[in-house]
Image (tube, rainbow, N blue to C red):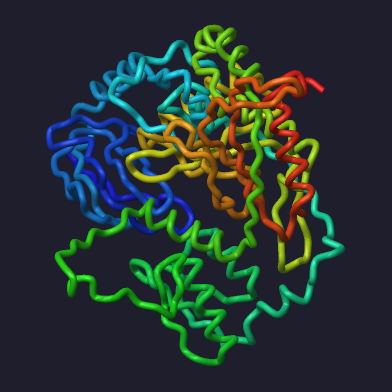
């Protein structure tokens, strides 16, 4: 029988390689078209690679831990043999597969969700999951929570308006001096976000020397190039998000050390957050919400939400509250375009939720939050969280958010300063709720208080607006009927 060589297909824009996490077939196995044969970690996500051929696997050319490139041979498949059986078994497997939902937590963990959620072996099977995407939520009483969602609806065009008070000269000043003719040849390997940064700074990315694998260009490489041109001298390439001028000391002089390579996801997280911290003038506003009444409602309606496939967590409710808040304060769902001196206002409410996984931090996006009820959002969160922990999120499912929620309540803490998820301009952090004595005018009463931390881009958002926004969010937790207004 004829044999076919299955090669690694294109994985997405500017993704040229990945690390093999798991090989899903072995010689002798039948394989059908669109059946996953390889689990691959790229610098953006962990993805399953489907086969484009059907037949019987005669040879596997890669193994776990190897780095493979687009176009590299993966399998040799003998066409025809075993294909029909494989397709039938694949269909049966899909029909019999069930999901798992978030695990209940102790009642004091009032503010868990989002980032605090880790997968556990004793996670309960999910009840019938309502339609919706990703992310399990942080329950006011749960330790391990789910997060973001995947429903991908239509996105409306953002409205672009001029920033009347923005110093337009600053954008021009940041642009480097004219560069020589770009080198001939293929475009430099770089993520779409890095290319966007280069365009905003007026840099031809083909002039930038990449410090990553195979010369991949990072955001920090672009920034280093701009500094070099502005200074008229040489600027060494640096690790993503770190200053270019300083090198680590030789730690082995003081004792035993061990070096481990960063995973692709950790490297990408480092690059993205390093750029966000350096590019955005961060300010963090703190407040507290009295959720004593909310906790009573959560216990009252928790079972009803569970029947819908989710948990009535703080994170699930926070999604709905943020959708209402950005409708009232639209600048919190905007992005700044320094090159044009404009703000881009997004007319949709897709909200991201940070999920803590064993592969690193993943941030799936729950779409159309404003049009969904809390029961549906809770189910979306549960499904998204499990999908993130299983490494099944697609790149599209982690794109398009207008604001992010990160919930550390399941771990602890009284406040923190989350980093804005660029190109967004704000992020809401939630810490662990606790009982505090609150004076009611006559005496002190024990009230369950939820700490909230709002980090924002001060180029776009004034301090007074941030205080009003966070107070509105706090009052919505305290008086849920505000969501209906």
Q: Residue 273: percent from the left, percent from the top?
A: 50, 57
Above or below residue 234? Residue 173 is above
Residue 131 relative to residue 459: left or right: left
Q: Quadrant of residue 291?
A: top right
Residue at (78, 65) in percent of width and height: 341
Q: Quadrant of the N terminus?
A: top left
Q: Is residue 283 above or below residue 386?
A: below
Give left or right: position of 71 versus 343.
left
In front of the other: 172 or 258: 258
Q: Quadrant of residue 264?
A: bottom left
Left or right, residue 361 beside residue 63: right
Q: Depth check: give the residue in front, 355 or 284.
A: 284
- Identify the residue at image location x=46%, y=28%: 146
Q: Position of residue 103 (x, y in %)?
A: 40, 20
In the figure, is residue 354 to the left or right of 422? left
Residue farthest toward the right in the current orientation of the protein: 164
Where is the C terminus found, in terms of image quarters? top right
- Provide residue 228's location: percent of width, then percent of height: 52, 85
Expressed as whole percent of the image width and height from the top left, the position of residue 209 reads 44, 78
Q: Residue furthest bottom?
A: 232
Q: How many marks?
A: 0
The residue lying at 34 percent from left, 41 percent from top is 49
Q: Is residue 397 visible?
A: no
Q: Nearer the viewer, residue 245 or 359?
A: 245
């Amino acid at each position: 029988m004829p044999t076919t060589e299955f090669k690694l297909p294109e994985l997405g824009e500017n993704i040229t390689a990945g690390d093999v996490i798991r090989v899903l077939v072995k010689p002798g196995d039948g394989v059908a078209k669109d059946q996953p044969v390889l689990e691959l970690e790229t610098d953006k996500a962990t993805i399953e690679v489907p086969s484009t051929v059907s037949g019987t696997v005669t040879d596997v050319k890669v193994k776990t831990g190897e780095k493979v490139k687009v176009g590299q041979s993966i399998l040799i498949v003998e066409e025809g043999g075993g294909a029909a059986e494989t397709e039938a078994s694949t269909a049966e497997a899909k029909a019999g597969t069930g999901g798992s939902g978030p695990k209940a937590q102790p009642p004091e963990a009032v503010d868990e969700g989002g980032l605090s959620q880790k997968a556990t072996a004793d996670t309960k099977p999910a009840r019938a999951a309502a339609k919706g995407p990703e992310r399990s939520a942080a329950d006011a009483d749960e330790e391990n929570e789910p997060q973001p969602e995947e429903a991908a609806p239509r996105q409306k065009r953002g409205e672009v308006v001029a920033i009347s008070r923005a110093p337009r000269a600053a954008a021009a000043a940041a642009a480097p001096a004219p560069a020589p003719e770009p080198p001939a040849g293929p475009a430099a390997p770089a993520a779409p976000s890095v290319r966007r940064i280069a365009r905003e700074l007026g840099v031809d990315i083909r002039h930038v020397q990449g410090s990553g694998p195979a010369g991949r260009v990072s955001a920090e490489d672009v920034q280093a190039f701009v500094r070099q041109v502005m200074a008229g001298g040489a600027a060494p390439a640096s690790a993503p998000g770190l200053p270019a001028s300083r090198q680590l000391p030789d730690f082995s002089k003081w004792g035993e050390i061990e070096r481990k390579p960063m995973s692709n996801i950790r490297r990408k997280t480092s690059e993205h957050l390093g750029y966000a911290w350096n590019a955005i003038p961060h300010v963090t506003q703190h407040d507290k919400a009295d959720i004593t009444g909310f906790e009573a409602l959560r216990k009252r309606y928790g079972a009803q939400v569970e029947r819908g496939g989710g948990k009535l967590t703080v994170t699930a409710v926070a999604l709905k509250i943020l959708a209402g808040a950005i409708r009232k304060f639209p600048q919190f769902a905007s992005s700044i375009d320094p090159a044009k001196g404009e703000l881009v206002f997004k007319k949709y409410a897709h909200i991201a939720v940070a999920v803590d996984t064993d592969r690193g931090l993943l941030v799936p996006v729950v779409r159309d939050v404003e049009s969904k009820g809390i029961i549906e959002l809770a189910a979306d969160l549960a499904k998204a969280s499990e999908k993130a922990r299983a490494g099944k999120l697609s790149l599209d499912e982690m794109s398009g958010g207008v604001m992010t929620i990160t919930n550390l309540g399941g771990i602890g803490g009284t406040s923190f300063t989350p980093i804005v998820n660029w190109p967004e301009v704000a992020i809401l952090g939630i810490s662990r709720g606790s009982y505090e004595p609150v004076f009611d005018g006559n005496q002190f009463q024990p009230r369950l208080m939820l700490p909230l931390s709002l980090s924002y881009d001060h180029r776009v958002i004034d301090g007074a607006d941030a205080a009003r926004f966070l107070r509105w969010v706090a009052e919505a937790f305290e008086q849920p009927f505000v969501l209906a207004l």
